[in-house]
Amino acid sequence: MLTLCLDIGGTKIAAGLADPDGTLVHTVTRPTPSGGAAEEVWAAVEATIADALHAAAGAVAAVGIGSAGPIDLPGGTVSPINIKGWQGFPLRDRAAAAVPGVPVRLGGDGVCMALGEHWRGAGRGADFLLGMVVSTGVGGGLVLGGIPYTGRTGNAGHVGHVVVEDGGPPCVCGGRGCVEAIASGPSMVRWARANGWSAPPVAGARELAAAAAAGDPVADRAFRRGATALAAMIASVGAVCDLDLVVIGGGVANSGRLLFDPLREKLAEYAGLDFLAGLRVVPAELGGQAGLVGAARLASLT
């Protein structure tokens, strides 16, 4: 039997059908309605579910959902920062009504990414894993002792909001000095522009990476600043959770050595405890499919 998996974020809504080994045999994607009201966004999710069910001839064994958060796991609701129309939206109950008669499991998109990489990607064989996406934002999820760790409300692993700079730049969460406010793609671009990087108004993280690779000193400093913030956070979370592996995906991570070289250099400097000496940081392998694969894995856990 197949598992219906969903990955819901601020820019796209994806659905997939996964076999028992975690192989995606069908996927479908729709854009998330920009600025849409709650029911408009749900209509797009429901249509995506219907497309996947049609491909499965209506027969699925379970539903797994990874959603942008924050989420309220006990209540089955979601309030994504980047989907303004969904505040306290009863996503689990709506999905259960759309796919009646099968169990539905909800999780945050960060923990689903981590689960996907742990099951089928770069995290295979690691029992204490932090999975991260560094892109428009900085998200994360934890797999501890081989199982997802969701915390009290389902929001454990929100590492993008670890504070690494006292009095640092404001963050969308309402705090200051968060990793996301320094190391996300838009944050690095914003800092680079403020410090003299000349680029067209539409230039983003990809163009910043190209400039850094070409030797632009400001662009290079922006990446090193972001990498330093990530390393400080990883050293702290690694010490708290006794991690053995960190897997990083997302658009900024696609810059490769521009990010990973200074990150590993700084991590070696910050992670001084003996038990952190073997902590590795590696690129993700599953790309945009990690959330779907992880949602399928989530649905299989009891």
Image: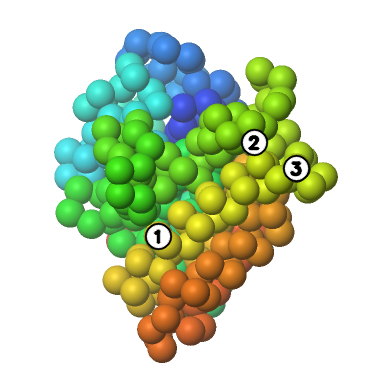
Question: In front of the other: label 3 or label 1?
Answer: 3
Which residue extends farthest right? 214
Q: Which residue is mark 2?
A: 205
Disc 2 marks a residue whose amino acid type is Ala
> x, y (%) of residue 282?
61, 66
Number of other residues with Cα within 10 Å of mark 2, as a class: few under 14, some 14 to 19, many 20 or more: many
Number of other residues with Cα within 10 Å of mark 1, as a class: few under 14, some 14 to 19, many 20 or more: many
Q: How many marks?
A: 3
Disc 3 marks a residue whose amino acid type is Asp
* Label 3 secondary element: loop
The disc at residue 216 is: 3
- Whether residue 170 sits left or right of residue 11 in the image: it is left
Q: Nearer the viewer, residue 141 or 213?
A: 213
> x, y (%) of residue 108?
36, 45
In three-dimensional space, the C-alpha distance between marks 3 and 1, rounded to whole angstroms, equals 26 Å
The disc at residue 233 is: 1
- Mark 2 or mark 1, earlier in chain: 2
The residue shown at (38%, 84%) is: 273
- Mark 3 or mark 2, earlier in chain: 2
- Mark 3 or mark 1, earlier in chain: 3
Q: Is residue 147 shown above or below 276?
A: above
- Whether residue 56 sits left or right of residue 142 in the image: it is right
* Label 1 secondary element: helix
Q: Is residue 125 shown above or below 81?
A: below
- Whether residue 85 sits left or right of residue 205 in the image: it is left
Disc 1 marks a residue whose amino acid type is Met
Residue 287 visible to an observer of this rendering: no
